[in-house]
Image (spheres, coloured by chain):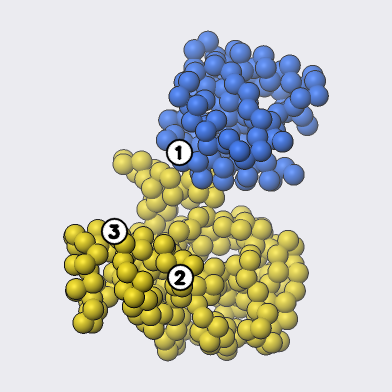
Chain colours: A blue, B yellow
Amino acid sequence: MKRILIIDDSRSIHAFVTSCLEGNGFVLEHAMNGVEGLAVLNESLQGANRFDLVFLDWEMPMMTGPELLAELKPGPNTPPVVMLTTRNSSTDIEKALQLGAAEYLMKPFTADVLLGKIADVIGSRD
Amino acid sequence: MAFAKAQMDFFARYIEENLGVVFTDANYFQLQTRLEQVMGSMGIQSEDELWTICRGGIVNPLKALLLDTATNNETSFFRDKHIFDTIRDSLLPELGRRSSEPRELRIWSAACSTGQEPYSIAMAIGKAPNAPKVEIFATDFSERVLNFARAGVYSHLQIQRGLPAALMVRYFEKQADDSWKVKPELQENIRFKQLHLLEDWPAIGSFDLVLCRNVLIYHNEINKKAVIKKIHGRLTPGGYLVLGAAESLLGLSTDFETVSIGKCLVHRKK
């Protein structure tokens, strides 16, 4: 089972991603803002329950997605981060990739696009 | 309401005769969906109305629309992505080494649909150091999808199917309506042309590599063999044929040697 962390301040995004991934062999964990997300991530890096992928929103209270990316220490156990955001300019996408995001998914999206992106990112590391 | 079995048989026979694409009882539900799309496009209100128009003979523009809609245009960038690594890392370098003088290699994307395959090939090659000079010849029988491919404008969802974000921002430009348009540099070496695989082919020259993926699965055995034989005739000696990941030449041709390169099976002309 692949473990995925969703960091987003929108409950509807958590619900939609969950509905897309249900029954596809994923274990999902949820964080509602950047600070909470970073704490969950850092804790997971110390333990056995590491994440295989993280979905990260851009604009959130307390800590934005790019701020979290800047704080996240790269390492062999650090999961790939996929930005999941309504921001869709080339400049924003390039900025996120430079900060270490593995991929970028623009909202709105469909289940097949979401699953395809997960397969591309996790598949390229297996 | 749905079409009667005899009506479905009529449309299936018409599509097979004109296109070589086979619909049977097992996928009549797909044919029903396609016929509903035709009705929607033509403003036809009911199955009975379409049947009345078609039963005496199907003529343009309905003919073109029906045949166009009967084919499956669903595709994504880098579909079965390992093949693009194999082309870039193994096939093109090997093909390039065969001649002592540097020469342009020719790739044919047969049934290129809305263009994702030829653009993916161009992006894959573009990343290679010392990439050989390549011409990509991209064909489809449908002018509608070719016009789409030539324009190279993909919706917000289409652009996200299979295309890594880094390549998206490198080779496409976001438009005001949130669609993404291919940059001219990616189109430089691609030539789009209308071509029907089952009809006589115009003078298209020979190719070092032909991709004919997930097309023949819709055809009957006679047409599959005929198309493969014609492709064989267009390949340079030792040139490669690439089929879809789930397709094989078993029972269709003995004119190729199937070889495993990278994570893919490809078919080398004997």
* Tag 3 residue: B1
Disc 2 with disc 3 on a shared chain: yes
Give the structural element (helix, strand or loop) at label 3. Answer: loop
Q: Disc 2 marks which residue?
A: B25
Residue at 54%, 16% in the rendered image: A32
Is B264 rendered above or below residue A58?
below
What chain does mark 3 sit on?
B
Q: Quadrant of the N terminus of chain A?
A: top right
In front here: B109 or B79? B79
Drawn side of residue B245 relative to residue B258, left or right:
left
Mark 3 vs mark 1: same chain? Answer: no
| Residue B261 appearing in the image | yes
Q: Is A71 above or below relative to B15?
A: above
CB under 8 Å between callouts 2 and 1? Answer: no
Q: Quadrant of residue A68?
A: top right
The spot of residue A28 in percent (x, y) is 63, 27
Q: CA distance from mark 2 to mark 1?
A: 34 Å
Are discs 2 and 1 located on one and the same chain?
A: no
Q: Quadrant of residue B99?
A: bottom right
Residue type at tag 3:
Met
| Tag nearer the camera, 2 or 1 | 2
Q: Nearer the viewer, residue B253 or B47?
A: B47
Q: Where residue B177 appears, x then y in whole percent? A: 31, 41
Q: Which residue is mark 1?
A: A109
CA distance for labels 3 and 1: 32 Å
Give the residue at x 31% y 40%.
Answer: B176
Chain for numbered disc 2? B
Residue at 38% x, 80% y is: B13
Disc 2 element: helix
Q: Position of residue B205 (x, y in %)?
A: 50, 85
To which chain does the residue with label 1 belong? A
